[in-house]
Amino acid sequence: MIVLKDSKALKKRLATMRSQSQSIGFVPTMGALHQGHLALVQQSKRQCSVTVCSIFVNPTQFNDPRDFEKYPVTIENDILLLEQNNTDILFIPSVAEMYPEGLKDGIHYDIGYLENILEGYYRPGHFQGVCRVLHKFLDIVEPDVMFMGSKDYQQCMVVKRLIELFAIPTRLQIVDTLREPDGLAMSSRNLRLNARDRQSATAIYHALNFIKENIHYKEIVGLRQGAAKMISEAGFEKIDYIEICDAQTLQPVTNIEGQTKLVALVAAFIGGVRLIDNMMI
């Protein structure tokens, strides 16, 4: 595995590979890698000639500086995992490398209503930061395919919008969420949970299953109330949202129509850690 920190060196190496008709797959991460990330790497390995993974904890997408400071950093283990999974290139840029212009300046990305609902509402500025950093990464790597996990459902929709806005010649491939044996969605934030909270955190998965299993038997209000009760009783101290939305638009639904594909989404805090998850219905 080649490890690079300089974007110019990475672009030069990838240009050579591209001239040899090698396809480029890209897996952007913020480190603290788990099997969910590695599933993205493996998918890229199956589909592309060259797999590039990045590790960069992006400061512009954290609306809470304390959350940025607490984000787990496990770089040595990350490198080992990527080597074991035959990643071709690891790109580990510094903040100065990614933001030579500084953190304050930047264009505004017109992502429409997605910026102000669900994650956008509770994390103002978050998706502007996501667009800003991924726009930079896509300019550097110029991948044929970028692989992202469906756990960050709204983020995937935002990135699709980014690609459309700038006619970026990259295809976004969304890979299913990987879960622990007890159902908890794999997430780097799980590392911040103590043993008790880690066990209780599975309530989000059970609440999503409750919604899925009862979608044709209860009203939307009853589904949300039932899910909220399960999550609260498990010890979560705060629920940002429990929503049932149109899977294509992410607009909340008020009644169930049999032919509409839905997604249930949850964000809640336990032990001071904010967890998100979703489930297709």
Image (spheres, rainbow, N blue to C red):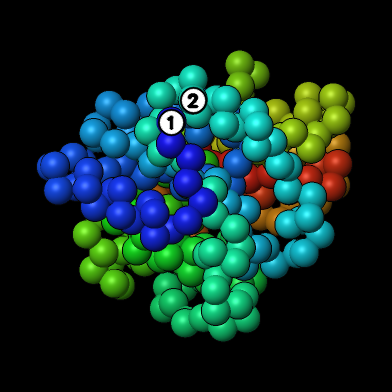
- Classify mark 2: helix, strand or loop: helix
Quadrant in the picture for the C terminus: top left
Residue 70 rendering spot, x and y as whole percentages:
79, 50
Residue 210 rendering spot, x and y as whole percentages:
60, 32
Q: Is residue 200 above or below residue 274?
A: above
Would residue 161 appear left or right of 36 to someone viewing this image? left
Quadrant in the picture for the N terminus: top left
Instruction: Give the amino acid at mark 1.
Output: Met
Which mark sits nearer the N-terminus, 2 or 1? 1
Q: Which residue is identified by label 2?
A: 83
Asked where in the image residue 230 lies, by quadrant, the reply is top right
Q: Marks 2/1: CA distance? A: 6 Å
- Classify mark 1: helix, strand or loop: loop
**Which residue is painted at 31% across and 41% down in the image?**
25
Extreme residue in the top direction: 181
Q: Could you tell me if the residues under marks 2 and 1 are in contact, i.e. CB atoms within 8 Å?
A: yes
Would residue 214 appear left or right of 134 to someone viewing this image? right
**Which residue is painted at 60% across and 41% down in the image?**
31
Q: Can residue 249 be seen in the rendering of this structure?
A: no
Give the label on residue 171, or none.
none
Instruction: Give the amino acid at mark 2.
Output: Glu
Q: Residues within 10 Å of mark 1 (few under 14, many from 20)?
A: some
Asked where in the image residue 34 lies, by quadrant, the reply is top right
Q: Which residue is identified by label 1?
A: 1
Pick the residue in front: 72 or 101: 101
**Which residue is painted at 55% across and 70% down in the image?**
99
Number of dots carrying numbers: 2
Residue 218 rendering spot, x and y as whole percentages:
55, 40
Pick the residue in front: 264 or 172: 172
Pick the residue in front: 249 or 82: 82
Pick the residue in front: 280 or 87: 87
Q: Residues within 10 Å of mark 2 (few under 14, many from 20)?
A: some
